[in-house]
Amino acid sequence: MSTTPRSRLRAQKTPLPHAAVQQDGTRRRILEEALQLFANEGFHGASIRTLAKAVGLQPSTLYSHFPSKEHVLAELARVGHEAHHEALREALLSAGPGPVEQVRALVRAHTLQHATHPQLAVVVNEELYALAPELAAPALAQREKSSALLVEAISRGVALGVFTPPEVLVTAAAIATMGLRIPYWYEPSEALPIDRLADLHAELALRMLGVRLSP
Amino acid sequence: MSTTPRSRLRAQKTPLPHAAVQQDGTRRRILEEALQLFANEGFHGASIRTLAKAVGLQPSTLYSHFPSKEHVLAELARVGHEAHHEALREALLSAGPGPVEQVRALVRAHTLQHATHPQLAVVVNEELYALAPELAAPALAQREKSSALLVEAISRGVALGVFTPPEVLVTAAAIATMGLRIPYWYEPSEALPIDRLADLHAELALRMLGVRLSP
DNA sequence: GATGGACGAACGATCGTTCGTTCGGTTAGT
DNA sequence: ACTAACCGAACGAACGATCGTTCGTCCATC
């Protein structure tokens, strides 16, 4: 009876995934449209036929590019986690050796990623449960590696006496979580551009860790 | 081909919703099972037949208690938001007049609610998008009221010079977000009981606001 | 002439929902 | 007090629609 015209995200425009997809044309277009649909209506809420129509293909043609609907989601999850992990890794490499600089770089990259690619963040974080375990495994493994980067940086700072969090893991979870909800409330604006949001999150993270910069 | 045995939550046990459901027997059992299913498999991922089987009824019988599948979710969303808002309100009332005490009380209540009723939190926050706007409206209105409680307490503290957040709304969002992801990673344990988690989150929130308690 | 992307039709399964009926308990009428 | 009327909960079967997927064929390109 009633359709569901709801869009889950604040930003309903279409940021493209990334350069990490291999430059095939149709396959990439499928992934782009699937990203929009899965983000807005959920994996189970979006149908193969809706996806095919969005791409401008017949439903059967999708199976020339992906063996199943689940594999489309799995590929999105893989791409998303890979891009995210790569962003964190690069941020860490170009940061200085100090824990403060490293955490700031990690949080900034984390926030930038989620603010720049909101639908990718949502699909990667909220729709992964719809995958069979063996298809979700690679993405989950990379997620583990990404969160380890933050925990390690924090632990290093604690060992050096620079950070004084009330508890390492809960604080790390709180810091990582800041980024995860961005797609639901944030929209870039002049008053709050993406880069400023990243700075604010970095500042909040350092405050949680007990660092006072400008007293 | 492949089923989806995934459970989205860390805690897959069955906390019951709340005393705010009216004490009807069957209707309540439907809501309880629907809560489990919607939380673990998503609204679109759970079927009326699965729900009926979980309750021990025929699918058609469900329609003696709810006019549609969507109405079951809408009722869960209503109950969840009501319980959450009530918890925040009571916490605020029994807190002192100081902004520090009020924010601590709000954050503690927020965290306790999400840690005690993880599936309710997930359904309320992640599955609402599946509802037609007119069914989601009451829940969204109450959510707005709840977040306003936090923002007001923070603003009062800022006006009094007690809080020095880098930016009010982003900081408020960060504080509220800490609680929202609890169901995905937290499980009560001896090392980290629920009450301790609530204290930690309150401490982190106050740190973000620029309050240093035990220097 | 082989390969692979695209098509249109169709498969069986499952979806949310409706229908007609039965049954047990409460209420109303005499 | 006995019966007739009623009503909501539950059932079993079935509805039409849509689901993910498969099949056979066509056609363009190498």
Image (tube, coloured by chain):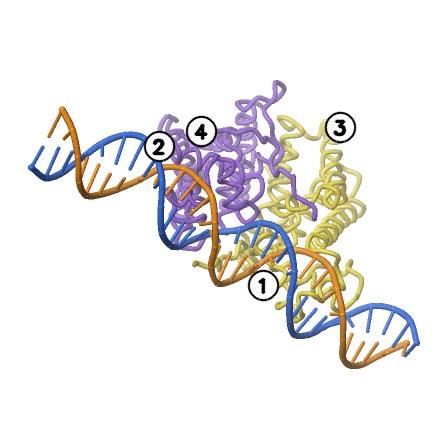
Chain colours: A yellow, B purple, C blue, D orange
Q: Are marks 3 and 1 on the same chain?
A: yes
**Residue that label 2 marks:** B24
At label 4, the amino acid type is: Ala
**Residue A134 vs residue A126, the one in the foreground:** A134
In the displayed structure, B106 sits above or below A2; it is above
Closer to the camera: disc 3 or disc 1?
1
Closer to the camera: disc 3 or disc 2?
2
**Residue that label 4 marks:** B105
**Residue B174 vs residue C27, the one in the foreground:** C27
**Residue that label 3 marks:** A160
- At a point 37% along the width and 32% down the height, the residue shown is B20
Give the class, few, some or many, for how many residues have Cα within 10 Å of label 2's Cα (few <14, many ≥20): few
At label 1, the amino acid type is: Lys
Measure the alpha-carbon separation of dots 2 and 4. 33 Å
Point out which mark residue A13 bears.
1
Measure the alpha-carbon separation of dots 3 and 4. 33 Å
> Is mark 1 in CB contact (under 8 Å) with mark 4?
no
Measure the alpha-carbon separation of dots 3 and 2. 58 Å
> Is mark 3 in CB contact (under 8 Å) with mark 2?
no
> Is mark 3 in CB contact (under 8 Å) with mark 1?
no
Task: Chain letter for mark 1, please.
Answer: A
- At a point 66% along the width and 30% down the height, the residue shown is A169
In the rendered structure, which disc, 3 or 1, sits on the residue that comes first in sequence?
Answer: 1
Task: Chain letter for mark 4, please.
Answer: B
